[in-house]
Every structure is written in C-alpha cells, then in structure tokens.
C-alpha cells in the first residue's frame, strides 16, 4: 500500500498480460519509508529519571526512490504478500516494545509512533538506547535510527562503592588510591558475514594501571565502541581487575542497514572506557582510543550473471 500511491494500480494492470520472460526483466520504482528521527520527551536533554515516565517517539517519512525487480520473487514477492506494508519495530534497552506494520502514508506526510517508557532503578547511571527499525529482517529495504538517554539516580547494587584510602607517612597526609583503566592494545578486522550483518571485529586489551582494584561492572558497558555512520555501536561488561591486571575483550559491530552499503567506505571508531564515570579513576583522560575500519569496494556485493529475460541488481544474499 505504501507505493501503491504511485504505481501499483498501473503496473499490475499493465504487466498482468505480459509474458513471464518479459515480466522478469521489468523493474519499477519503489519509494520506501525510512526512519527520520528518534527522540525522548525528557525535559532534561539526554537524561531521564528512574521511576519517571518518558515518551519515546519515532518519526517515519519517505526517503527516496529505490529500484525493485518485478520478477514475482524476492523483495517484490514479499511486498505483494504483505500488501506493500513494511514491518516496524521500536526497541528500548534492547527489548522490542512495539511491533506493527506501517500504514499507507502520502509522500509529504509523516507517521509518528510513541511509547511510554519508565526507566527502572536498575538502569540508574546507565545509557539506555532507543532504536526504531523499518524492515528489521531486511527483506526489502532496512532503515534504522537510534538515540540514547542516561538514566539519573543512584546506581543500584555493586556500583555504589567507595575508594580505598591508603595511609602515607608524609606529614600525616591521606591519599586516595584509585583504579586507572587504559587501552593497552586495540585492533580491528573485517568480518565477511553478509547474511548476519556482522561486519567488523574489535579486539581490545584493557589494563588497570591504578593503585586499587577496578570493580566488576554487571549490567554496565564499561568497555564501549562508538561507531561512525553505517555501523552499530557495541559494548561489553568488564570483570573485576586488580592493580596492574589486564583483560582482553572482543566486540562485533553489525552493519546498520545492508552491509553492501559499507563498500568503499572508511568508518571511524572510538573505544571508550568507563565513559559515564561509574567508578572514580585516578585519570579519566586515558580512557579512549581512536581506530578506523575500511571496507573494500566489493564488500558484500554478490556477483551477478545475466540470464535470458532477467535483470538482477547486486545486493546481499537473501
């Protein structure tokens, strides 16, 4: 129904009587909807309060013309079977909170969807992501946008900690011995898993160079990779690290949309440690490391072979 506004009535009538071989060679324009914005209604920009409802809003609108093969298979068959309506999901904190199909909208109009979300006490002190996704299974044309807020409030459980106080003999002074996380080593490599959208693998070796232990971080992404456009961010927890102890972690970055869109691009990455300062450190200035990952020009682009009466566009395997 989405693109029926433009062409489906005419195309269906005109192509109904055409021979199959000719029908397979026809392409038509498809004007798919895309996610334009994702926002929170919190009065304090970028922050939300534990226990207080927040409205999460997604705005959907048309993003431009795409080509689809009218061969009765693949994306075209999927659109016909679903009445030209694409599925939509809203996710908050990694959980799907809304799931439905986008109704027919005009080219100049937008479709807004809201969800009332109440941050829990266990989310206090953490960043919580909201993501709006069209066509999450990437049957036709995936589109996604995301945003996050930091939940205010006293951190729950083991994150409420005090630093170790070490007595010294210098004129009776007292000094705070604190942990100090730093990126000891880091590297990035490509992942050629086009069907799963896994596109890059980041290995990070983290060291606590401070004078006291760094506590474990259950439920908190103390190690986080902030990815540039085209890749999704990723984060992991860290175990407790004693002074001068190191740990190595691996994070997999997924493509945001079709992996083939990354072909020929160089995406910046930033490794971030203890970004929101859940634990006080001796030095917070050594908690980042910048990298980049480059994708070859043919990344996830399948080879095409011309068959009689067929026109096949390159794209990831379905």
Image (spheres, rainbow, N blue to C red):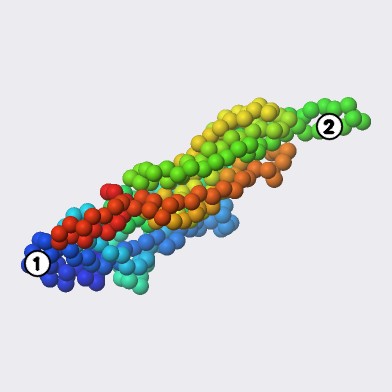
| Quadrant showing the N terminus | bottom left
Residue named by callout 2: 174
Q: Nearer the viewer, mark 2 or mark 1?
A: 1
Which of 257 and 1 lies nearest the eye of the viewer?
257
The residue at the point 40 percent across, 60 percent down is: 35
Label 2 packing within 10 angstroms: few (<14), some (14-19), many (20+): few
Q: Is residue 186 above or below residue 63?
A: above
How far apart are the two marked residues, 2 and 1, measured between alpha carbons? Answer: 88 Å
Q: Residue 279, how many percent across, how many down?
A: 65, 37
Picture quadrant of residue 278: top right
One can see residue 160 in this view: no
Label 1 packing within 10 angstroms: few (<14), some (14-19), many (20+): few
Picture quadrant of residue 187: top right
The residue at the point 30 percent across, 59 percent down is: 102
The residue at the point 27 percent across, 49 percent down is: 318
Which of 156 and 261 lies nearest the eye of the viewer?
261
Q: Residue 32, how many percent across, how many down?
A: 31, 63
In the image: residue 177, left or right of residue 296: right
């Amino acid at each position: 129904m989405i693109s029926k506004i433009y062409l489906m009535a005419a195309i269906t009538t005109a192509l109904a009587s055409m021979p199959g071989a000719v029908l397979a060679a026809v392409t038509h324009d498809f004007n798919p909807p895309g996610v334009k914005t994702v926002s929170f209604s919190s009065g304090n920009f970028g922050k939300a309060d534990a226990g207080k409802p927040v409205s999460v809003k997604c705005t959907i609108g048309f993003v431009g013309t795409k080509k689809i093969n009218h061969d009765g298979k693949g994306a075209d068959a999927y659109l016909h079977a679903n009445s030209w309506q694409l599925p939509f999901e809203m996710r908050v904190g990694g959980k799907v909170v809304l799931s439905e199909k986008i109704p027919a909208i005009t080219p100049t109009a937008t479709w807004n969807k809201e969800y009332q979300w109440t941050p829990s006490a266990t989310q206090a002190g953490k960043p919580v992501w909201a993501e709006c996704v069209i066509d999450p299974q990437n049957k036709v044309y995936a589109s996604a946008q995301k945003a996050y807020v930091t939940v205010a409030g006293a951190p729950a459980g083991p994150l409420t900690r005090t630093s170790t106080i070490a007595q010294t003999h210098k004129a009776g002074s007292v000094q705070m011995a604190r942990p100090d996380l730093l990126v000891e080593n880091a590297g990035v490599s490509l992942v050629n898993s086009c069907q799963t959208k896994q596109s890059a693998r980041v290995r990070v070796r983290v060291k606590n160079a401070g004078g006291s232990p760094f506590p474990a971080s259950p439920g908190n992404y103390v190690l986080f990779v902030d990815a540039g456009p085209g890749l999704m961010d990723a984060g992991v927890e860290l175990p407790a690290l004693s002074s001068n102890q190191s740990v190595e972690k691996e994070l997999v970055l997924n493509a945001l949309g079709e992996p083939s869109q990354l072909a020929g691009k160089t995406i910046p990455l930033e490794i971030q440690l203890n970004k929101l300062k859940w634990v006080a450190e001796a030095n917070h200035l050594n908690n980042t490391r910048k990298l980049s990952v480059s994708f070859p020009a043919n990344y996830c682009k399948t080879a095409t072979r011309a068959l009689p009466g067929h026109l096949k566009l390159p794209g990831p395997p379905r």
